[in-house]
Amino acid sequence: MVLMAIEQSEMDRWLGSEEIEVRRCPGCRTKILIREADTIVVKNAILRVTLRTGDASAKCPRCKGWVEVPLRYVAQ
């Protein structure tokens, strides 16, 4: 079974923040990730996960580049 979780170190930095942060694709500047107070929205459903580390990347819908997102998949 694979579960989706946010790394604790990333979550610590984001909790309690009232501002809205937007992460964009470095190639075409399309919005990929929007973070609000306690919610993270990845604006694209295609995710790539590195099996060894569990790090995730989202595929940009416009330029098809990969953008790192603050998610980590862990197996139980």
Image (tube, helix red, strand yellow):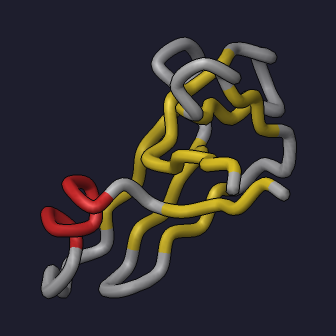
Between 39 and 25, the one lying in front of the other is: 39
Question: Looking at the rendering, in which quadrant would you find the C terminus?
Answer: bottom right
| Residue nearest the viewer, comparing 70 with 32 | 70
Residue 1 position (above or below residue 29): below
Q: Which residue is drawn at 78% across and 54% down?
A: 2
At x 70%, y 61%, the residue is 3
Residue 15 x %, y %: 20, 79
**Residue 14 located left or right of residue 40:** left
For residue 18, side relative to residue 41 (left or right):
left
- Please identify the residue farthest to the front as the structure is shown: 76
* Residue 67 located left or right of residue 65: left
What percent of the width, then of the height, locates residue 16? Answer: 14, 86
Q: Which residue is drawn at 46% across and 19% down?
A: 26
Count of number-bearing discs: 0
- Quarter residue 35 falls in: bottom left
Please state, as top left, top right, bottom left or bottom right, where the N terminus lies in the image.
bottom right
